[in-house]
Amino acid sequence: MEEKILVTNISEIEPNHKAEHERYEYFKYEVTARDKFDQAYCCMYKIPPKKAGYPYHTHTENTEIFYIISGEGILETPDGERKVSPGDIIVCPPSKTEAHRLTNSSDSEMLVYLDVDTQNSPDILHYPETGKTGIIIQNDSARFFKDSEEVGYYEGEK
């Protein structure tokens, strides 16, 4: 674990660019490496126009906080859609029912936000639109399963 104060600048961080699906794309600037900061994970995201960083999902173990720096977006929750803009702070508590997705609503500007998450492991994610469950184990793995493939506890055991 890191025991020194971290001071950095976004210009010093090489972004991870991910664009594996037509609707989802991001540039992720990892401020606190997961293997060095076990209490909180901090990233800066840049989301291209009309894209979202992640699908509509919940976390059962971790709080996720977004601070909108620039651009405009749409926050989707079970209560509907809401516009978000610079200065907005969004706190998504751990819950099986409080799903969220943040999408860039601009035709030309990046949506830029700071994302800070607690780091309770494992975290169980639910994707209500697609019927999937994800299990994320800190510094180890992330695995995703279709809920329809559920098996009995003793299935396949000898």
Image (spheres, rainbow, N blue to C red):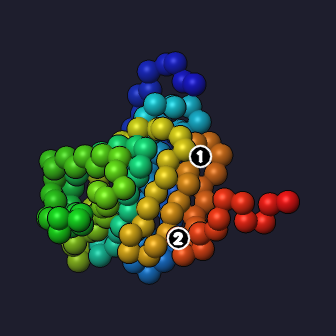
Q: CA distance from mark 1 to mark 2?
A: 19 Å
Q: Amino acid at mark 2?
A: Asp
Describe residue 108's horizontal placement relative to residue 29 as left or right.
left
Disc 1 element? strand
Disc 2 element? helix
Nearer mark to the viewer, of 1 and 2: 2
* Crowd around label 1: few <14 · some 14–19 · many ≥20 (10 Å): some
In terms of depth relative to the viewer, which is nearer, 23 or 147? 147
* Residue drawn at point x = 38 percent, y = 69 percent: 128
Q: Quadrant of residue 56?
A: bottom left
Q: Position of residue 135 (x, y in %)?
A: 56, 54
Which residue is label 2 attached to?
A: 147
Identify the image quadrant of the N terminus: top right
| The label number, if any, that marks residue 137 in the structure image | 1
Describe residue 77's horizontal placement relative to residue 26 as left or right.
left
Tell how many labels: 2
Q: Position of residue 64 (x, y in %)?
A: 34, 46
- Residue 61 vertical placement versus 51 (above, below): above
Q: Amino acid at mark 1?
A: Ile
Of the image marks 1 and 2, the number of the one nearer the N terminus = 1
- The answer to whether residue 39 is visible is yes
